[in-house]
């Protein structure tokens, strides 16, 4: 039986960043990840980093490649009624910007740092359960290389995503879940085509939502709203490009660059929050506690915000013996989580075509988009939410890391 101070379950962005932050504060930890390294590094996820996320990655020494290869964006474009409107972030949100740098690249950078002298990180270590959440030493049970093991901890952090097992350590009598599903999904593609725009385009159209994003100056990432249950194989490359063309169409000059499609997949859309995010000595962070639909690009950034709050609380406990900030963890995080849930819901329901909608509701969507396009006050609300609010209390932590 092994022992560690903080047992971390899951090597997604939440678990990896937490391990990095704890190590910089002198707190030992172990990370257990059920998948192998190649799988963890190649999962396609979103790609927008808020200013606070950029700052934390830089401060903990994980920003070098991000600063070289990431693309700084100062706004987004909204398209509706065949017209394009730009939302200027720095002008509307106190100089804040975002960076396009894929989550999969963030994960690669953090794994490399972790294996290069960081805390132990075990791949193909599948956690089966967490017991003793309300005791002094919660225990992680896992299998690795065909054998079962236990890891006793002072604290356990479940960074094991939506399908993880840590949530089950919180008794159902004290756990509340809040959920919403949506009557549509996204078909996402990667294409070897230079982006057709300098900034992301979010398009409302009578045919459904479309999003133009990018991964680099040679690779485009695009999404189409599709019905739930869609099989990506039903969509030929030509059909995808034709549909994208139709949904991005505006009056005036604009051309969508086509190129070979290298990946195609369907993503479900869901909102979910589990409360509280802490029970006894077990904490939940990132997707393990909350899911947002991808329209606001908040998932990764929320995971980062959670672990910054948690690392700061652990550092305070380690230095002073006080559990005060650990006690406040759930309430502190949930304030940001619910703000982001609202924003993601707002972006999703304002931009997508709901099959249940009648023309009245479509008119309401267009009225809201028109308001954002014509009022700096309304646009500032979008810009502030999109670029992200300052992280709670990171300056002291960042100074230290
Ligand atoms: N044992 C060990 N590891 C597990 C287990 C388990 N039983 N269950 C899940 N995991 C691992 C998964 O394989 C994955 O690597 O936990 C990790 C969770 O990582 P993510 O799903 O990336 O979640 P998180 O780190 O919270 O990052 C949030 O990821 O899903 C996106 O939109 C989301 O961008 C957001 C970000
Ligand atoms: C992406 O680049 O994958 C992306 C960007 C913005 C979003 C969602 C996904 O809102």
Image: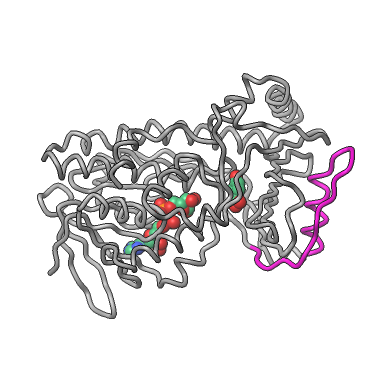
- Which coloring applies here? one colour
Residue 259 in the magenta stretch? The answer is yes
From this view, report whether residue 24 is shown above or below residue 232.
above
Q: Is residue 161 found left or right of 182 in the rendered image? A: left
In this rendered view, identify the residue nearer to me: 70 or 339.
70
Write the residue at 40% across / 45% down: 56
From this view, report whether residue 178 is shown above or below residue 234.
above
Write the residue at 29% across / 66% down: 117
Q: Is residue 9 found left or right of 314 in the rendered image? A: right
What is the magenta range? 237-264
In this rendered view, identify the residue nearer to me: 178 or 220.
220
Q: Is residue 105 found left or right of 197 in the rendered image? A: left
Q: Position of residue 27 (x, y in %)?
A: 20, 53
In this rendered view, identify the residue nearer to me: 246 or 26.
26
Q: Is residue 8 visible?
A: yes
Residue 246 in the magenta stretch? The answer is yes
Q: Position of residue 254 (x, y in %)?
A: 85, 45
Q: Position of residue 325 (x, y in %)?
A: 22, 35
Give residue 122's quadrant in the image: bottom left
Count of residue discs = 0
From this view, report whether residue 377 is shown above or below residue 273.
above
Point out the residue furthest to the right here: 252
Location of the N terminus (image quadrant): bottom left
Write the residue at 26% across / 47% down: 283
Write the residue at 39% across / 64% down: 111
Point out the residue furthest to the bottom here: 146
Q: Is residue 69 found left or right of 187 in the rendered image? A: left
Q: Is residue 162 visible?
A: no
Judged from the image, the quadrant occupied by ligand 1 is bottom left
Give residue 126's quadrant in the image: bottom left
Q: Position of residue 320 (x, y in %)?
A: 12, 39
């Amino acid at each position: 039986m092994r022992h560690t101070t903080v047992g971390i379950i899951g090597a997604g962005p939440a678990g990896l960043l937490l391990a990095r932050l704890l190590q910089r504060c002198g707190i030992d930890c172990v990370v257990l990840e059920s998948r192998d390294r190649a799988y963890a590094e190649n999962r396609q996820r979103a790609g927008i980093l808020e200013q606070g996320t950029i700052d934390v990655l830089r401060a903990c020494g994980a920003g070098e490649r991000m600063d070289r290869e990431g693309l700084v964006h100062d706004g987004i474009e909204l398209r509706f009624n065949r017209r394009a409107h730009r939302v200027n972030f720095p002008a509307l949100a106190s100089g804040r910007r975002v960076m396009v740098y894929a989550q999969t690249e963030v994960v690669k950078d953090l794994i490399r740092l972790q294996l290069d002298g960081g805390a132990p990180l075990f791949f193909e270590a599948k956690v089966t359960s967490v017991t003793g959440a309300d005791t002094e030493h919660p225990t992680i049970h896992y299998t690795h290389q065909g054998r079962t093991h236990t890891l006793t901890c002072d604290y356990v952090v479940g960074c094991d995503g939506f399908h993880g097992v840590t949530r089950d350590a919180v008794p159902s009598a004290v756990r509340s879940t809040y959920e919403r599903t949506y009557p549509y999904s996204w078909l996402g593609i990667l294409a070897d085509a230079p982006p057709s725009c300098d900034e992301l385009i979010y398009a409302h159209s009578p045919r459904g939502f479309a999003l133009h994003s990018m991964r680099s100056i040679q690779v485009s990432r695009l999404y189409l709203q599709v019905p739930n249950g869609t099989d990506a194989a039903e969509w030929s490359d030509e059909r995808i490009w034709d549909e994208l063309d139709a949904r991005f169409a505006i009056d005036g000059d604009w051309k969508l660059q086509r190129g070979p499609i290298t990946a195609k997949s369907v993503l479900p859309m869901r909102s979910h929050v589990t409360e509280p995010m802490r029970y006894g000595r077990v904490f939940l962070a990132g997707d393990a506690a909350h899911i947002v639909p991808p329209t606001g690009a908040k998932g990764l950034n929320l995971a980062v915000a959670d672990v910054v709050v948690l690392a700061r609380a652990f550092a305070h406990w380690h230095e002073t013996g006080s559990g005060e900030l650990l006690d406040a963890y759930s309430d502190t995080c949930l304030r940001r989580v619910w703000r982001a849930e609202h924003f993601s819901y707002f972006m999703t329901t304002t931009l997508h075509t709901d099959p249940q909608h009648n023309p009245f509701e479509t008119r309401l969507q267009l009225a809201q988009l028109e308001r954002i396009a014509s009022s700096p006050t309304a646009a500032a609300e979008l810009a502030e939410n999109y670029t992200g609010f300052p992280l709670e209390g990171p300056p002291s932590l960042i100074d230290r890391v």
